[in-house]
Image: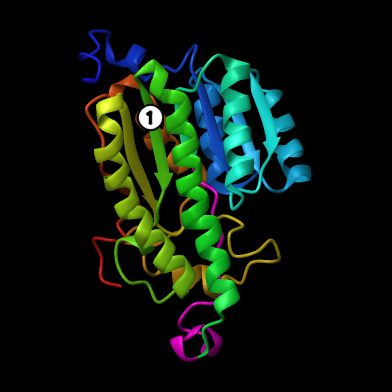
Amino acid sequence: MSSPAPDPRPLPDRLRLDGRHALVTGAASGLGLAIAEGLLQSGAAVTMLDVDGAELTRSAAALTTAGGTVGTRVCDVSDAAQVEAAVAEAAREHGGLDAVFANAGIAGGPSVQSPEGRLYDLDWTTFDGALAVNLVGTLATVRAAARVMRPAGRGSVVVTVSTAGLRADAMVGYGYSASKGALANLVRQAAVDLAPDGIRVNGIAPGPFHTNIGGRGPKDPAIDQAWADTVLLKRMGDPREVQGLAVLLASDASSFMTGAVYPVDGGTLAGVF
């Protein structure tokens, strides 16, 4: 099956998501919440998935006050059966699924700059946990989405990778680095596999953003500054700064884009670490 022909509509219309259904994992906070908000503002109905049910409810309620259709499902992406059920149920509820953002992820242990994060003392349980959420959970999400998109012969899958998945990063640990590096190639592999079914697969590679991935406690200004120092723009990103790319990749304006990972990193990859 070939992909749909180029859309003749004007660009503003191709960027709109009216009548579309999008699903976002890890949507209760951080980048996932910002992505859900951007999709909603662009006209999509959004299903938000997260393992934290209480925070998911609060975040969804805040988005609903701005209008639009928002649904929620508590889901642990490391459990493939939960993912399959949640995605299938959301698709049935909305009559299909047009875009999925496989965004859920965890830090997965201390950085290699910490004595306990170095290879010599790598904790296998922590490492396995990072792979279970970041890699296996993402693969389960992509598979579940592809299964419900295939009959329609179209769909957009977007994976949250990381700049740490595109080059070495001393600020993260082995579990995060290994899982995100694998996701970069997963995007390309899935794009090859799913293109005949009309399903596009791309990745977003965020640089340092202000999120809760490192924990919900008070932020250490010294750590934030260390992250900012790796960025050409000399600051960390606001989650809303990923919304433009997210909406583009979900929309028909990106109809000829598949199999690539796009950094949103303030110039991190272009600079000297």
Residue 231 x %, y %: 36, 63
Asked if the magenta segment contains residue 154, the reply would be no
Q: Looking at the image, how many numbered discs can be counted on the residues?
A: 1
In this picture the colour scheme is rainbow
Q: Along the line of sight, which residue is nearer the eye, 135 or 113?
A: 135
Image quarter (top left, top right, bottom left or bottom right) of the N terminus? top left
Write the residue at 42% across / 32% down: 146
Q: Position of residue 152 (x, y in %)?
A: 40, 16
261 sits to left or right of 64: left
In the figure, is residue 228 to the left or right of 186?
right
- Whether residue 170 is visible here, answered yes or no, is yes
Tell me the residue at 28%/61% (across/down): 269
Name above or below for residue 215 compared with residue 91: below
Instruction: List the residue tagged with mark 1.
Output: 156
| Residue 6, picture quadrant | top left
Magenta-highlighted residues: 102-120
Residue 159: give x, y in percent of width and height.
41, 44
Name the amino acid type tagged 1: Ser
The furthest residue to the right? 54
**x and y percentages locating residue 171 in the rendered image:** 44, 74
Name the quadrant containing residue 265: bottom left
Comparing 113 with 229, the one in front is 113
